[in-house]
């Protein structure tokens, strides 16, 4: 019978960073991935900050680099503003290549990666787990569920949105500007995005409650009235419901999308899910080294101390957004002062953007709406009206 200290189901950013941490601490580690190739099919826009990559232990590999995006244009139906993202060093990477880069790190550290191998079931066998896979049974001491949204879907349906993203060739796609378009009629509860890849190429995506994402994207692209080609289409759900309350169950750890570790505002997860993997791998390694399984809970504690507060603000912003109509969104965007926009450009962080959200949520319109909708919650997360006066510049 094959035996490993750690078996990880799911070979994407969260599973692979877990594997790298476990194996680099000398633990026998296997990753099983049901798809035939690591990184494929790619379900991602690939937007990430350079500092996020560094925290994940990754150097930017020029083969994976697609573009730098120093500007973000945020639009509503009849208002718009631009943020400079120069200081945040936001880039677009090829997710296929990024996942392979982490797979190579894990392999170099001693992990084994097995593609076309599907997790089927888990059973406890004294102090071990017996994992049934499409390639037979494997035993392990620690099991990591990094299977993505499929695992979360079993736990909860709330927070899942359908999304689509097309890779498009079109001259009107600007080289260096990421665009976010809010329209509560067309994309209720979320938005449309354009991630430029340079040279007239981009990833155009959309999500929204109860919408036909394919129709919405086709309509938007056609509305430009110019020639285009769609060279790739992906349809995948995103998670905006916040983290699970528990990540550790006995000697099983849940990481990444499977644990709800994507940002509730944008559904971005490369950094926060990857950190889930790093922290889980470190906790497992400590537990093995010290022969103390209570140390597994350090993973949950450390991830939550890094992200919980941020995610709470993002969940609150999401609640507000879901209740705003186009008129209110227009009102908020057009009431933003130059100073507020400059402050966000200069001081906010791509990975931890609650300070930016606070600035927008504290505009008069949003504050009034928020007070009515969820007053107490707003005050708990962002502080009192007195604080507002110090930080809002309208
Ligand atoms: C359209 C779209 C655009 C996005 N854009 C961005 C972006 O620009 N920036 C950003 O930061 N995030 C983005 N995200 C989110 C990001 O892609 C995810 O948060 C991230 O990939 C989560 O990583 P993960 O390892 O937790 O899960 P996943 O990447 O979902 O990986 C789970 C893995 O488990 C495997 N698996 C599933 N079931 C089994 C099984 N039974 N046995 C074995 N293997 C199994 C799957 O094949 C998959 O490889 C986007 C998501 C979508 C859908």
Image (cartoon, rainbow, N blue to C red):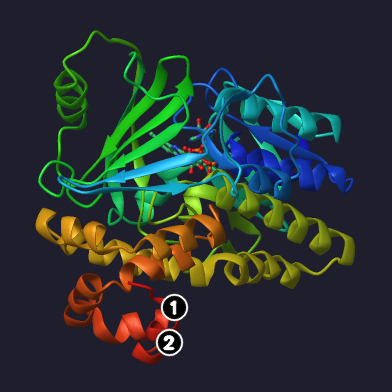
Task: Answer with the quarter of the image where residue 43 lies.
Answer: top left
The front one of 81 and 22 is: 81
Q: Is residue 265 left or right of residue 18?
A: left
Q: Position of residue 368 (x, y in %)?
A: 19, 78
Q: Position of residue 378 (x, y in %)?
A: 33, 80
Query: Is the residue at mark 1 in contact range of ligand 1, meaning its CB lies under 8 Å from it?
Result: no
Does 236 appear above or below 252?
Answer: above
Which element carries disc 2, helix, strand or loop? helix
Which element carries disc 1, helix, strand or loop? helix
Q: Is residue 56 left or right of residue 14?
A: right
The front one of 6 and 101 is: 101
Q: Quadrant of the N terminus?
A: top right
Q: CA distance from mark 1 to mark 2?
A: 7 Å
Q: Is residue 12 left or right of residue 81?
A: right
Name the residue carrying label 2.
387
Residue name at image x 53 percent, y 27 percent:
34
Q: Quadrant of the C terminus?
A: bottom left
Name the residue carrying label 1.
391
Does 89 appear above or below 166?
Answer: below
């Amino acid at each position: 019978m094959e035996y490993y200290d750690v078996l990880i189901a799911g070979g994407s950013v969260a599973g692979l960073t877990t594997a790298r941490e476990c194996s680099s601490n000398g633990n026998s580690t296997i990753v099983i991935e049901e798809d035939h190739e690591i990184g494929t099919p790619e379900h991602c826009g690939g937007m990430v900050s350079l500092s996020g990559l560094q925290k994940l232990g990754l150097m930017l590999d020029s083969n994976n680099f697609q573009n730098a995006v120093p500007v973000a244009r945020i639009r509503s139906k009849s208002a718009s503003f631009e943020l400079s993202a120069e200081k945040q060093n936001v880039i677009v990477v090829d997710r296929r290549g990024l996942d392979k880069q982490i797979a190579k790190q894990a392999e170099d550290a001693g992990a084994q990666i097995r593609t076309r191998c599907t997790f089927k079931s888990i059973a406890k066998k004294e102090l071990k787990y017996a994992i049934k896979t499409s390639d037979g049974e494997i035993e392990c001491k620690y099991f990591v569920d990094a299977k993505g949204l499929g695992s979360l879907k079993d736990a909860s349906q709330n927070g899942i949105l359908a999304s689509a993203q097309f890779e498009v060739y079109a001259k009107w796609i600007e080289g260096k500007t990421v665009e976010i378009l809010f329209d509560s009629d067309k994309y209720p509860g979320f938005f449309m995005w354009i991630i430029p890849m340079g040279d007239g190429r981009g990833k155009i995506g959309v999500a929204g409650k109860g919408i036909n994402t394919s129709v919405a994207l086709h309509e938007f692209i056609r509305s430009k009235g110019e020639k285009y080609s769609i060279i790739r289409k992906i349809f995948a759900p995103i998670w905006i419901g916040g983290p699970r309350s528990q990540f550790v169950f006995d000697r099983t750890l849940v990481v990444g999308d499977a644990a709800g570790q994507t940002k509730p505002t944008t559904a971005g997860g490369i950094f926060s899910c990857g950190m889930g993997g790093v922290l889980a791998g470190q906790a497992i390694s400590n537990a093995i080294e010290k022969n103390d399984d209570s140390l597994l809970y350090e993973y949950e504690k450390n991830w939550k101390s890094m992200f919980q507060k941020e995610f709470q603000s993002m969940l609150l912003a999401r609640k507000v957004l879901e209740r705003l109509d186009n008129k209110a969104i227009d009102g908020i965007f057009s009431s933003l002062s130059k100073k507020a926009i400059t402050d966000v450009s200069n001081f906010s962080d791509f990975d931890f953007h609650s300070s930016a959200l606070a600035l927008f949520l504290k505009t008069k319109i949003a504050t009034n709406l928020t007070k009515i909708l969820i007053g107490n919650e707003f005050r708990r997360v962002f502080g009192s009206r007195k604080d507002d006066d110090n930080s809002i510049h309208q």
